[in-house]
Image (cartoon, rainbow, N blue to C red):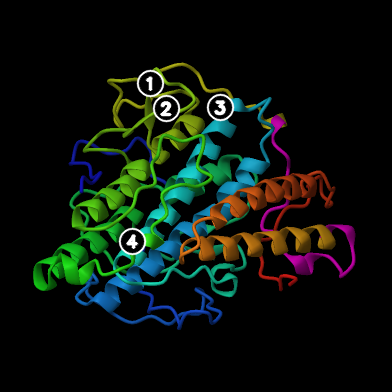
């Protein structure tokens, strides 16, 4: 798998956030609520070596939790944008969100391929914001905020390419790429030790290869052996960081601009922050030198940061609308879990649910919430109605 790491002269134009080193213990058993703020710490080797199939399955479940954790922040930024006034930002954030959905599905395919069972339990996945990235560097905080400087800085830290010679990190990972490197390392080790047939023992019928993934050049493919597993990992990392040392491209064509290649997530977000597009020949050192990217701040809804259900009394209009959104989102997670566990036709139902979510979120962002802000979705767990 190709990785994006830069040599001493090839540093990204912008580094966002400082990096700490702490370690998080494995999550509690599946289905039980977990608060990543309260998970205790233990010392461990930096590489977090994956030596057993059970450990591999555990890490791939963590990958599902990781990819899911990126969705609420991207959705809040996306739904706060007026696409008629901020088309470049809406296209960029929208395509990144869809590709994060592909990464979630690829992680589920990987887990199914090695005999695991993907779990998207709302009581585990839905945490109060701001929150840490599951099993990641706790200095990174994920918040629900509208599109703007704070959101872009958070997303740049989230998608940050690995540092020079960065080691694989299976827990408390500094970058997402290092976490997936640890999974790759474990896959190669186990295939060498046990053989591919023993490792890739899952039911091929549980693989998902289609879904609501328009507006992106990314692909969702089945995983059946080491080669296809490495290709899936490569797709995830390249879309986030880029294709090679010093490159800003992810290897796909730009779905909105078919005449040019697609920029990886990190550099798409940097284009929005720096106000200019990358051209062929541009590097992380030169920065983007292409056409201007214009952001209209008046075309962004001022959603209240990190809203909570508890901010409003039971029965109030905002609370009712937030609870309705949360029920729909929990339903989406249940549909995706069913799709990843032998009922791929549920992806069709999930597509309809995602359209309902969009309408409900946009309705919330039209509701005044004091201090010149609007309401917004909270992404908290609520009981779904039978």
Which mark, residue 260?
1
- Residue 193: x percent and y percent? 10, 72
Which mark, residue 250?
none
**Relative to 204, is 144 on the left or the right?**
right
* Mark 3 or 1: the one toward you: 1
* Mark 3 or 2: the one toward you: 2
Q: Residues within 10 Å of mark 1 (few under 14, many from 20)?
A: few
Q: Earlier in the sequence, mark 3 or mark 2?
A: 3
At 52% from the left and 45% from the top, the residue drawn is 97
Quadrant in which the C terminus appears: bottom right
What residue did someone put label 4 on? 204
**Relative to 19, is 243 on the left or the right?**
left
Per the rendered image, the range of residues in magenta is 299-318
Q: Earlier in the sequence, mark 2 or mark 1?
A: 2
- Label 4: element kind: helix
- Judging depth in this view, the residue of 56 and 208 nearest the camera is 208
What residue did someone put label 2 on? 254
Number of labels in the image equals 4
Q: Residues within 10 Å of mark 3 (few under 14, many from 20)?
A: some
């Amino acid at each position: 798998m190709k990785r994006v790491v830069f040599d001493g002269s090839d540093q990204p134009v912008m580094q966002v956030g400082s990096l700490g080193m702490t370690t998080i213990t494995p999550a509690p058993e599946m289905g039980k609520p977990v608060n990543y703020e309260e998970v205790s710490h233990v010392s461990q080797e930096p590489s977090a070596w994956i030596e057993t199939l059970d450990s591999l399955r555990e890490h791939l479940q963590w990958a599902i939790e990781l990819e899911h954790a990126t969705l609420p922040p991207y959705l809040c930024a996306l739904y706060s944008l007026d696409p008629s006034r901020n088309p470049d930002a809406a296209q960029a954030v929208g395509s990144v969100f869809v590709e994060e959905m592909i990464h979630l599905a690829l992680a589920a395919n990987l887990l199914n391929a090695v005999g695991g069972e993907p779990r998207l339990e709302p009581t585990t996945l839905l945490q109060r914001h701001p929150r840490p990235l599951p099993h990641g560097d706790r200095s990174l905080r994920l918040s629900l905020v509208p599109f703007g400087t704070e959101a872009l800085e958070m997303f740049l830290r989230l998608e940050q390419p690995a540092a020079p010679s960065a080691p694989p990190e299976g827990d408390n990972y500094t970058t997402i790429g290092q976490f997936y490197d640890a999974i790759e390392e474990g896959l190669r080790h186990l295939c060498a030790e046990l053989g591919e047939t023993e490792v890739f023992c899952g039911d091929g019928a549980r693989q998902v290869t289609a879904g609501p993934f328009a507006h992106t050049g990314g692909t969702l493919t089945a995983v059946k052996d080491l080669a296809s597993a490495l290709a899936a990992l490569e797709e995830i990392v390249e879309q986030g960081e880029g294709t090679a040392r010093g490159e800003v491209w992810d290897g796909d064509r730009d779905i909105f601009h078919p005449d040019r290649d697609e920029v990886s997530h990190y550099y798409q977000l940097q284009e929005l922050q720096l106000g200019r597009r990358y051209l062929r020949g541009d590097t992380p050192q030169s920065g983007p030198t292409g056409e201007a990217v214009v952001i209209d701040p008046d075309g962004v809804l001022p959603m209240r940061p990190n809203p909570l259900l508890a901010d409003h009394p039971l029965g109030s209009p905002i609370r009712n609308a937030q609870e309705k959104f949360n029920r729909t989102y929990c339903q989406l997670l249940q549909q995706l879990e069913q799709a990843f566990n032998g009922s791929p036709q549920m992806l069709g139902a999930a597509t309809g649910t995602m359209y309902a979510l969009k309408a409900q979120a946009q309705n919330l962002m039209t509701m005044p919430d004091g201090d010149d802000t609007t309401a917004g979705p909270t992404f908290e767990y609520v009981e779904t109605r039978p």
